[in-house]
Amino acid sequence: MSTRQGKRYTTSYKEREHPKQDPYAMLKAPKGPAICRKCLAIYADKRWHFDEVKASKLAASPRTRKLVCPACQKIRDDYPEGIVTLTWSGLREHDSEIRGLIANVEARAVSVNPLDRVMKIVRRKNELEVQTTNDRLAQRLGRALVRSYKGKAVYHWAHRDMMVRVTWQGPEGKRGELKKREKVLAG
Ligand SMILES: [Zn+2]
């Protein structure tokens, strides 16, 4: 159910009216390698990557351009491009497990693109809100939650398609039914 919705959404994403203009995109690529002074991500050959050994060498060289990468800029400016809201009565019970899942999805995303990051996780009453530096990671989190716990994820684009809001609702129906059945059995 939710996967179908996800797929349909992916298609409309490709056909979106407004091509995405990330205000944090690096329009002018620096010549030679550059390094983020906050997270030590390296920019070379038009892409970002992490490499601790190379990073410490680059950081020590006066010729290396030092800047703040788009992900660290978004974190500094509190500018999420993805917000995932988790609603589920089982949230507290599965809290550490869910946070582990979020960390795993982020780690996989970061290994491909260091700019895909979780900015913060905020608890609001019975909800958990995860803010990400880009829409891709937010969508991945929605899919991962559905894969692991079922339930349903809904995707909404906002701010001229710059930002995605993902709402994941955990599997309440089944739990409710289960309780009802238990009651019937008990009665
Ligand atoms: Zn950075």
Image (cartoon, rainbow, N blue to C red):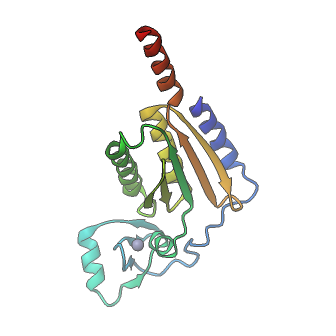
Q: Residue at image x 65%, y 42%?
A: 9
The foreground one among 77 and 16 is 77
Whether residue 59 sits left or right of residue 16 in the image: it is left
Q: Residue at image x 51%, y 20%?
A: 177
Q: Residue at image x 57%, y 71%?
A: 25
Whether residue 4 sits left or right of residue 142 in the image: it is right
Quick one: which residue is furthest to the front in this view?
Answer: 187
Q: Residue 158: name its quadrant.
A: bottom right
* Horizontal and vertical percent position of residue 107: 35, 53
The foreground one among 3 and 18 is 3
The foreground one among 43 and 16 is 16
Whether residue 154 sits left or right of residue 123 in the image: it is right
| Quadrant of picture, ligand 1 | bottom left
Q: Is residue 118 visible?
A: no
* Horizontal and vertical percent position of residue 66: 39, 84
Quick one: which residue is furthest to the right in this view?
Answer: 17
Q: Residue at image x 27%, y 72%?
A: 54
Up the image or down, 24 lies above or below 177; here it is: below
> Which image quarter is the N terminus in?
top right
Q: Residue 160: name its quadrant.
A: bottom right
> Which image quarter is the C terminus in?
top left
Q: Is residue 85 visible?
A: yes
* Horizontal and vertical percent position of residue 173: 54, 26
